[in-house]
Image: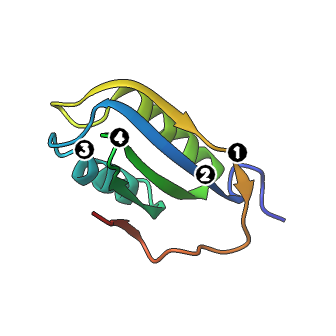
């Protein structure tokens, strides 16, 4: 039986602030890959970056903190909003991709 830290979870996110044209998606992809997470991110028409994270609960929590506090060097994060964390049995994405 897997411990709660190693169960797979999925969560949606949206980051507000100066997060476009500051390499935010590239840095998000690098951090997600470093943590072994799957998912995606993309720019939105309203100037935010949104996406989905999949992975072990502890690694997803670490990535959530990164999205709230760190981001790319030139970004200015106002806030990060997260959807409900849901348990998943298997990954639904191959790796972590930048969509657009």
Q: Which residue is mark 4?
A: 48
Q: Secondary structure at mark 4?
A: loop
**Disc nearest the viewer among 4 and 3:** 4
What residue appears at the point 35 percent right and 67 percent down from the top-left corner? 97
Answer whether residue 58 is visible to the viewer in this image: yes
- Residue 59: x and y, percent? 54, 48
- Residue 99: x and y, percent? 32, 66
- Residue 75: x and y, percent? 22, 31
Q: Secondary structure at mark 2?
A: strand
Answer whether residue 59 is visible to the viewer in this image: no
Q: Residues within 10 Å of mark 4 (few under 14, many from 20)?
A: some
Res. 1 image quadrant: bottom right
Q: Which residue is mark 3?
A: 24
How many numbered markers are drawn? Answer: 4
Q: CA distance from mark 4 to mark 3?
A: 10 Å
What residue appears at the point 41 percent right and 37 percent down from the top-left corner? 15
Task: Give the position of the C terminus as an image quadrant.
Answer: bottom left
Q: Residues within 10 Å of mark 1 (few under 14, many from 20)?
A: few
Name the colouring of the figure.
rainbow
Tell me whether circle 1 and circle 2 mark residues in contact (CB < 8 Å): yes
Q: Residues within 10 Å of mark 2 (few under 14, many from 20)?
A: many
**Disc nearest the viewer among 4 and 1:** 4
Q: Which residue is mark 1?
A: 84
Q: Toward the viewer: 71 or 84?
A: 84
Q: Which mark is residue 11?
A: 2
Q: Earlier in the sequence, mark 1 or mark 2?
A: 2
- Residue 44: x and y, percent? 35, 50
Outermost front residue: 45
Q: Earlier in the sequence, mark 3 or mark 2?
A: 2
């Amino acid at each position: 039986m897997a411990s709660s830290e190693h169960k797979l979870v999925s969560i949606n996110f949206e980051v507000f602030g100066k997060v476009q044209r500051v390499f935010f998606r590239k840095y998000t992809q690098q951090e997600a890959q470093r943590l072994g997470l799957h998912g995606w991110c993309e720019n939105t028409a309203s100037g935010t970056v949104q996406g989905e994270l999949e992975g072990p609960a502890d690694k997803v929590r670490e990535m959530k903190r990164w999205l709230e506090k760190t981001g790319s060097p030139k970004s200015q994060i106002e806030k990060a909003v997260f959807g409900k964390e849901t348990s998943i049995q298997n990954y639904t994405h191959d790796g972590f991709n930048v969509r657009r």
